[in-house]
Amino acid sequence: MSPASPLGVPLSRFAPAPTGYLHLGHVANAIYVWGVTKAAGGAILLRIEDHDRRRSRAVYEQALLEDLEWLGFVPDRPPFAAFRGGACDGRQRDRTAVYDAALATLRAAGRVYACDCSRADILRDSGGGDELRYPGTCRDRHLDDGPGRGLRVRLDATVERFVDLRHGPQVQQPSAQCGDVLVRDRDGNWTYQFVAAVDDLVQGVTLVVRGDDLLASTGRQIQLARLLGREAPPRFLHHGLIMKTATQKLSKSDGDTSVREQRAHRRSAADIIGQAAALVGLCGTPAPLFAADVPRLPPLVDLAQLVARP
Ligand code: GLU
C-alpha cells in the first residue's frame, strides 16, 4: 500500500461513529474540519466509523447524515473516490477486504500475534499509569487465531515525532504508552486505532482534524501507517473539546445537546453552529454562524495557513 494524494489538495475527513446522535461536540469538530480544510483549499471525505458492530446503529447513521446536511456541512463528492478495494460507500463495516489486506501486510512482516488476554488481565498486569498499557503477555505464546482471541501488532520501541498544528512539536512512544496495539478484538471487531490508520492511508487523507482526546493516539497511528507502507504521515490538528464538567467531555448520552433535540426545539442551524463555536473558544460570545461562513473565522484562517507549510 502506498499513500495516495488523489486530489493534489489537502484531503481531510469527518469521521463520526454512528453510536448516538450528532451533538455539540461533533458540531465543534465539523467547524474545525470544514473551516480549516476549506480555508486551505482542501476537500473533505465523510467516513462512517461503524467498526464497532455492537454499538453502531443504522438509525444513528441516518440521523447523523441528515443532521449534518441540515447544518450545512457538505462533504465533497463522490466521497470515496479514493477508496481502493471493498465497497465504495465509506462505511467501515463494508470494508473488511481492505482491513484484511492491511492485516495480511502486517502478518507478512511478522508483526501480528493472537492474544487471549481480557481487559481485566491487562488491568492487573499493566502496572498502572495514565493509559492501559498492554504488557506483551502473549507476544511469544504463539497462540493460533480463533474465536475469543484478539490480534495485536508488535510495535517497535521507536519515538514518534510530529508537529501538531495547534499544539506544536509532539514526542510519543507508543510501545511505552499502550504497548502492542490491538487491531481486532476478541469479538472480531476491528479496533479504532487500526481502521483509522488504514483508512487515512488508503483514502489518501493528508489532514487529520479531531479532538484533543485523540492526541495521544496519533503516534501509534503514525507507526501503524508506516508499517503499512505510508511514507509521509498526514498533518494533524487536535482541537479543544466542549466539556460538560471540568473533567468530562460532552458525550452522545447528553441528549439535551444533540442536534436532533435542538432541531425539535426549533433552533436554527446557525444558532447551533454559533453556540458550538463559542463553546470551543473560536469566538467570544455565541452569535449565529452559517456553515458556509465557518472558513472565514480568523483562528481557522490562521491554522489553514499552517497546513500548506512543510
Ligand atoms: N470516530 C471518532 C469520533 O467520532 C473520530 C476519530 C478520528 O477522527 O480519528 O470521535
Image (cartoon, rainbow, N blue to C red):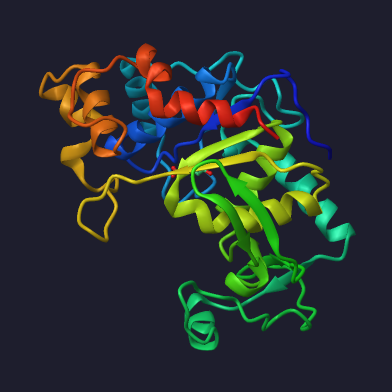
Residue 208, by quadrant, is top right
| Image location (x, y in percent) of residue 231 | 82, 43
- Looking at the image, residue 98 lies above or below residue 120: above
49 on left or right of 89: left
- Looking at the image, residue 112 lies above or below residue 22: below
- Residue depicted at 28% across the width and 45% down the height: 242
Between 84 and 269, the residue placed more toward the observer is 269
Where does the N terminus fall, quadrant-wise?
top right
148 on left or right of 48: right
155 on left or right of 194: right
- Residue depicted at 30% across the width and 39% down the height: 280
20 on left or right of 253: right
Q: How many marks?
A: 0
- Residue depicted at 12% across the width and 18% down the height: 266
| Image location (x, y in percent) of residue 302 | 48, 28
| Image location (x, y in percent) of residue 70 | 31, 16
Residue 170, by quadrant, is bottom right
- Residue depicted at 49% across the width and 75% down the height: 119
Question: Furthest residue to the left?
Answer: 265
| Image location (x, y in percent) of residue 9 | 67, 20
